[in-house]
Image (spheres, rainbow, N blue to C red):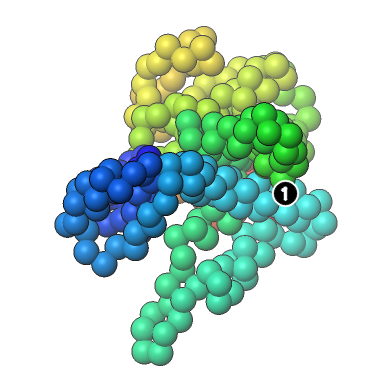
Amino acid sequence: MNPEFLTEGQAVADFMRRDRIVLGAADDETRRLLRQLYAGFANVPIVETNNSTAEMIKYASNALLATMISFTNELARLSSRLGDVDAIDVMRGVHLSAYLTSRQAGLPSVLAPIASSLEPGCGFGDSCLPKDVTALIAHGEKHGVDMPLQRAVLAINRGQPEEVLRLLRKRLPDLHGVRAVVLGVTFKPHTDDLSESPAFPEIRLLRDAGAHVEAYDPLIQESDHPDLREIRLHETLEKALERAQALVLITRWAEFADFGPRLRARGATPVVIDGRRLLSPGQVDMYEGIGR
């Protein structure tokens, strides 16, 4: 059992500049061959263990990321209800703690990469986090161990599309006939992977509310995904912005970070729901952001 720790869109870089090597083996000969296989990776920490523990390391690593995301989104929901609290600033303050930011005399501060999971958003997708958290819950059921924390992680994540819709209804209580454009349908930028993307429950909620739903993603111009078959997929961001009454930002594509001036140049004032807190609120006239 030799788990990988690769991020889609940067898998080669993650493999070559790995932060750890986990070697699970059932016998000494297998362990020796695994050591030989990874001999070229100098100064990389190695964990040698049995197969079941190696597999659990993989599950635990993904479950930690999922838990941090849902933890942040739960606080973001509270922040948006309290008033005068912005979850972005809250998390910035958390990021500066010594357990997330490394400081050495004479060197720039370094933020731990895991801090990216402590940012408010519209929820996690992909084929790994939901699957692995679900697997842990299933293993618990099989062995008579309840997993309430992991259940809560999934429950919070499932509720984030409703949170996005709530923000849209603050500006547009009646969505019937509203031309709503979903920005981003891949589960993350720099990949064309649609696995468990938070865009799809959002699209279903918008359609159920009577909105006329369209979408744009830099890498997806056509798809046979059931939630995309009956909606228009725009070829460019300019086309997507043209007649939009509501823009719902789901994926953190860099292209979406600066469309505010383009809207103002044409005098357009659609409602913008920032599901990733990618925009500066002052960029657009009618802005709502997760956790704000």
Image position of 164 with respect to 12: above or below = above
Q: Give the image quarter of residue 193.
A: top left
Residue type indicated by callout 1: Glu
Which residue is found at the position 46% from the left and 65% from the top? Answer: 112
Q: Where is residue 50 in the image (x, y as percent from the top left)?
A: 43, 46
Please, which residue is most extreme toward the bottom here? Answer: 105
Q: Observer-nearest residue: 20 or 82?
A: 20
Which residue is found at the position 51% from the left and 12% from the top? Answer: 226
Compared across the picture, whether 184 is left or right of 95 comes to left
Q: Position of residue 74 (x, y in %)?
A: 72, 49
Image position of 90 with respect to 119: above or below = below
Q: Where is residue 225 in the image (x, y as percent from the top left)?
A: 46, 15
Q: Give the image quarter of residue 220.
A: top left
Q: Observer-nearest residue: 268 or 210?
A: 210
Quarter of the C terminus within the rendering: bottom right
Which residue is found at the position 78% from the left and 30% from the top? Answer: 173
Q: Observer-nearest residue: 18 or 81?
A: 18
